[in-house]
Image (cartoon, grey):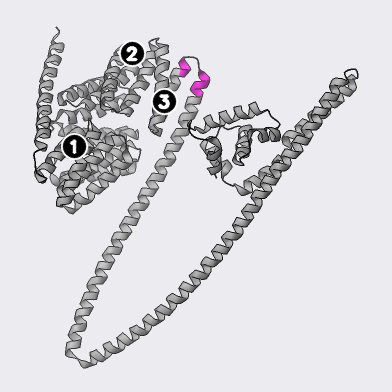
Amino acid sequence: MPEKDKITLLLFLVISGLIGVRGQHISELEQQLHGLPDDTVKINMLLELGSHYCYTEADKALLYLQEALVLSTGQNYKKGIAGSFFWQGRAYYYKDEYVIATQYLEKARQFFEETEDLQGLMNYQLATGTINNLTGNYPNAIKSFQQAIVLSKQADNKQNLYLSYCGLGKVYLQRSELSLAKDYFHEALVLAPDIAEPSLLSILFSHLGRTHELNHKYDSALVYYEQSLQQSIAGGGIRMIASSEYNLGSLLVKTGQYEDALKKLEASRNKFEALQDDTGICINMIEMAKALFYTGKKDRSRQFIEEVFLLVERLDNLSLKSDAYINLAPVMAASGKHDMAYQYMVINNTLQDSLAAINKEKIIRELEMQFQTERKKDEIQLLKSQNEIQKKNILLLYVSLSGSLIILVLVFFLLRYKSKGLKRQKELYRSEKNLMKQEAEIREKEQLLLKEQLDGKKRELASKALEMLRINEAIGNVIEKLELFTEGCTENEELTRNIKSIVLGLESQLKNNSWIEFEKIFTNIHSGFFKKLLSICPELTSSEIKIAVLLKLNLNTKEIAAITFKSESAIKSTRYRLRNKLGLENDQSLVPYLIRLD
């Protein structure tokens, strides 16, 4: 056996022993838990179990943490409340439910601040920075990691300082600002000798590998990724090992070493499946689809591609969906499906625009919340100042009353003056109340008038639809009679041509009959319908839009066929395409969906 393989085997055996010891400790904790009274000792055990399982079995972790929260709340054990909220946030993070995770972390922060828990605040900043970075909210991610750096230096906590530098470097790595990323990773590398935990070292080597990969220094990137995998194995964390194997596999795909890449990616995917981490499974399958294609296993590659798109649709993660399309477009191009490759790129551009808009809106909303929070703090501070001034005034008043009858008389007149002021305020309040009542009545009348106008327009729209139906049916009857007449006059070709020309003209008139006027009336009543419909599915044809409009009016297939001069089977086919493009489930009805869309 080669020396390298011997060392790897020995390292694996040692790690397995450490994991076994840790697993035995957790099992002992779970056994002791049942016989303990509901005190802080039991709460701390529940928190330890929750923090252990949140990385691997998030649902199990949540059960322990929720029990810890109930007991902590009952005993007003604020440290336990803060810990349970924090680790629940981490558990939801590993379940990819970032909004819920952020809510729990915010609750934890309030208790950390109340108890002045510096370590807790550092952990909070690191956790929120990670979520903001993952969701593309880079300004807030940078702010969180910078605050974590300040807190870590204040507490002289080198491990958290190391993690803060790694986190900040990763944000700039995500933003493709590689020089800034390298600077922060270098700061973390300086602290690396003081970090004894292999899983933390694995993070840094992974980021350094990614930095070199983006600089197209693949050999250096491969060295760092292998170091990251070794540290992950030494740390014994299945998630870290899976991430390191994915990084190696992805780089091997990029450098054309497809067989080695498939081994790493398959191992990584198996671990993510054990963790029930759909995001990890998906990113592995994207790279595996590419590797399988370039090794000639095109059927398996096609199967993986189909599974990838099913998974990204279920996850509803725009960023992940964008990655799938941008990575698989070259595969489509290489297989000769250039139109599909182009379509993938178009979809990716649309998704990127959506992500940019969402991130912009999110940042604006968060900045607004920060502004509101700061304003409330200023208002509270102002109220406190006013209260202090008021207390001093009252004290001065009492001193003056005890020493002087004149002051007493002045106070009497002052109270009388205030009483008159209150009466005036009451009268003003009554006047304002009456005015508000009158305004409410006016608004109610306006709403009734608008309702009547809307009802009138709806009746006009229905009348127009019926008019179109009657006219189209009449013209249709004329066409049928002319066609029958043509069949009986086959001898006169000129007459036959003239009749056919008339039929074509009538059919053209029948297709366009009163539609423009009908569309104007419809738009006045349902002003937002076309905009919302096209925002959901921009690629709808004009024919499909017309059918959607008529379905919204609750017309049946036969009536729509008469208005549009199409067969009922064609209308049903258009309805089927419309359902697919709108992404409706089997149990969702098309007509109620369109009626609600306004």
In the rendered structure, does residue 468 fall within the stretch colored magenta? no
Residue 280: x percent and y percent?
31, 26
Looking at marks 3 and 2 on the same chain, the residue that comes earlier in the sequence is marked by 2
Looking at marks 2 and 1 on the same chain, the residue that comes earlier in the sequence is marked by 1
Label drawn at residue 319: none
Disc nearest the viewer among 3 and 2: 3
Locate the C terminus by quadrant: top right
Disc nearest the viewer among 2 and 1: 1
The magenta segment: 332-342
- Looking at the image, residue 71 lies above or below residue 289: below
Quick check: 269 left or right of 356? left
Residue 308: x percent and y percent?
39, 23
Q: Quadrant of residue 186?
A: top left
Residue extending farthest to the right is 492
Residue at the spot of label 3: 310
Question: What amino acid type should be assigned to the residue bearing mark 2?
Answer: Tyr
Question: What amino acid type should be assigned to the residue bearing mark 3?
Answer: Leu
Residue at the spot of label 1: 50
The residue lying at 44 percent from left, 76 percent from top is 430
Residues tagged 2 and 1 counted as in contact (Cβ below 8 A): no
Give the overall secondary structure of the magenta segment.
helix
- Looking at the image, residue 311 lies above or below residue 47: above
Question: What amino acid type should be assigned to the residue bearing mark 1?
Answer: Gly
The answer to whether residue 414 is visible is: yes
Q: Quadrant of residue 95?
A: top left
**Disc 2 element:** helix
Residue at the spot of label 2: 258
In the rendered structure, does residue 334 fall within the stretch colored magenta? yes
